[in-house]
Image (cartoon, rainbow, N blue to C red):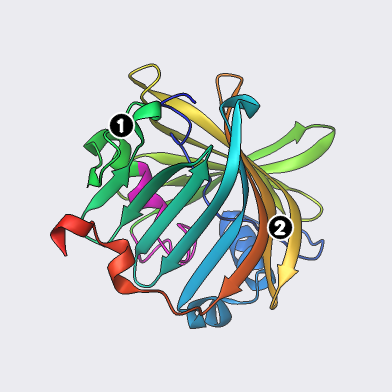
Amino acid sequence: MKRTLLVALPLMFGLSAPPAHAQDADELVKRGLEALGGVDKLKSLKSRRLSGQITVSGGAASGTFVSTQQRPNWLRFEADILGNLIVQAYDGHEVWQIQPAIAGGSGVPETMPKEQAEAVVLRSDFDGPLVDYKAKGHKIELLGEEEMEANQVYHLRLTLKQGSDIHYYMDAKTYLVHKTVLTQFNPLTGTRDDFDVLASDYREVDGIRIAHSLETVSQGMSFNHLKIEKVEFNIEADPKSFVRPESQ
């Protein structure tokens, strides 16, 4: 099992809407959020738990995962791979992890290195970067239409308040986001590299559409592939589970 098996976990974001003539980036975002169930419904959610199967390092190892999020920005992702516990978590203040020795870690809860923690903080946004993006200080623009796997897609670029970009590729007919591209630190190379998040198998759960297959790829390598088997909303999550044990 390679040290990089959980470098970049997917941003849990997908859009769907009835076919229409999108006018600009703002309109595309608006249609997508309405199709997700509407901003009011999305904001009524207090917590979310996704669980299923995970494959890492291009299929070299596999196991199970559970991802739990709770407002305002708490996140805990844990995976059991070949009997090894891996945890990435954020309590709104500190990003911490458990990396087993087989993956190059200490096997105990520890603060995550700053360059890797950036991606976890981004994922901790409960509603995702596009909800209230203007209020968050982000900017969106439509770069045009492109062809991807014989389908026309809209290419949207979201520039985050801190300056980095997220690129979304949205199907021009279904308004589903099939690919998201972001730049993150890659401990395998020691540099910041592009990571593609490929989303498919969209299903509706309690009126909200979620991609049930999410694969993260960089430089032609599949870092991890999540297959979601269960989605739960408004579950009771223990607040202490998001906090590094030694700091409780």
Q: Which element carries disc 1, helix, strand or loop?
A: loop
Distance of label 2 from label 1 (alpha carbons): 47 Å
Q: Main secondary structure of the magenta part?
A: loop
Magenta-drawn stretch contains 125: yes
Q: Tell me if 102 is positioned left or right of 29 in this view.
A: left
Residue 122, x across and y down, in percent: 38, 50
Residue 219, x across and y down, in percent: 55, 19
Is any atom of residue 160 visible in this view? no
Which residues are the magenta region?
119-136
Q: Residue furthest right?
A: 150
For the point 31% across and 45% down, the residue is: 97
For the point 55% across and 54% down, the residue is: 12
Q: How crowded is the residue under tag 2: few (<14 C-alpha within 10 Å), some, or many (20+)?
A: some
Magenta-drawn stretch contains 54: no
| Front one among 216 and 174 | 216
Q: Which residue is mark 1?
A: 105
